[in-house]
Amino acid sequence: MKRSLSTFPPRVLLATLLLACCVGEAVAALGAAPSVAAPASGARRLAAAASAAYTVQETVLATGTTVREYVNAEGVVFAVSWKGPVLPDLGALLGSYAGTLQSHVKDPSRAGMRRAPVNLEQDGLVVRSIGRMGNFFGNAYAPALIPTGVSISDVLQ
């Protein structure tokens, strides 16, 4: 028997749609070199901004979410921020720091808080993420990678 889309539970359809939208987005990972490849299909790179201590590269993903990469003079992404209708793949944005976030959200003390805002500050990583369907925003940074003399609160305002 064939199933039509209307016979699938709404949660299954929503999860499938979100996964399909997030596949193949071209963004850099925290602590890595910035993404220099052409953005994924449907994404577009906006102009980069620069200061003496760091540069900012902004990409609008195919999902409509804007991701900013903050790159220090050594060419390493020290912070990322996002804002848009779909939460980007935080595992991809955080790169080698993703395990720290995973441990935090799976912590038993957060049981029942699956949709609660993330406010993590540990192990050389700070992550702030909040939102709801259609309006997600947040940022993450590695304090050790912030350029000398740069205030992260000024950068991520």
Image (cartoon, rainbow, N blue to C red):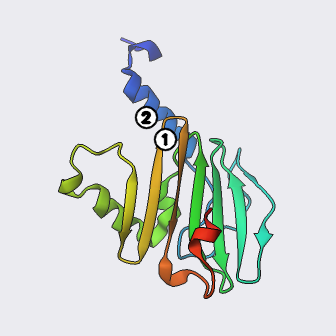
Quick one: SS at disc 2?
helix
Apparent side of residue 103 relative to residue 138 in the rendered image (left or right): left
Q: Is residue 151 above or below residue 149?
A: above
Q: Which mark is residue 66?
A: none
User: Are dots 1 and 2 in contact, CB under 8 Å?
Assistant: yes
**Among all residues in the image, which is located at the extreme right?**
47
**Residue 6 or 71: which is nearer the viewer?**
71
Q: Residue at x 48, y 68 (%)?
A: 95
Does residue 4 show up?
A: no
Does residue 94 show up?
A: yes
Q: Is residue 84 above or below residue 45?
A: above
Residue density around tag 1, few if under 14, some if 14–19, many if 20 or more, within 10 Å: few
Residue density around tag 2, few if under 14, some if 14–19, many if 20 or more, within 10 Å: few
Quadrant in which the C terminus is drawn: bottom right
- Give the residue type that dot 2 points to: Ala
**Residue 21 or 72: which is nearer the viewer?**
72
Apparent side of residue 38 relative to residue 80 in the rendered image (left or right): right
Please give the residue where the numbered disc 2 appears in the rendered image: 15
Q: Position of residue 118 (x, y in %)?
A: 39, 54
Q: Position of residue 58 (x, y in %)?
A: 71, 59
Please give the residue where the numbered disc 1 appears in the rendered image: 19
Q: Position of residue 120 (x, y in %)?
A: 37, 63
Q: CA distance from mark 1 to mark 2?
A: 6 Å
- Give the mark count: 2
Q: Residue at x 64, y 66 (%)?
A: 69
Q: Residue at x 46, y 17 (%)?
A: 5
Q: Residue at x 36, y 21 (%)?
A: 9
Quick one: SS at disc 1?
helix
Quadrant in which the N terminus is drawn: top left
Apparent side of residue 108 relative to residue 97 in the rendered image (left or right): left
- Give the residue type that dot 1 points to: Leu
Q: Position of residue 153 (x, y in %)?
A: 57, 69
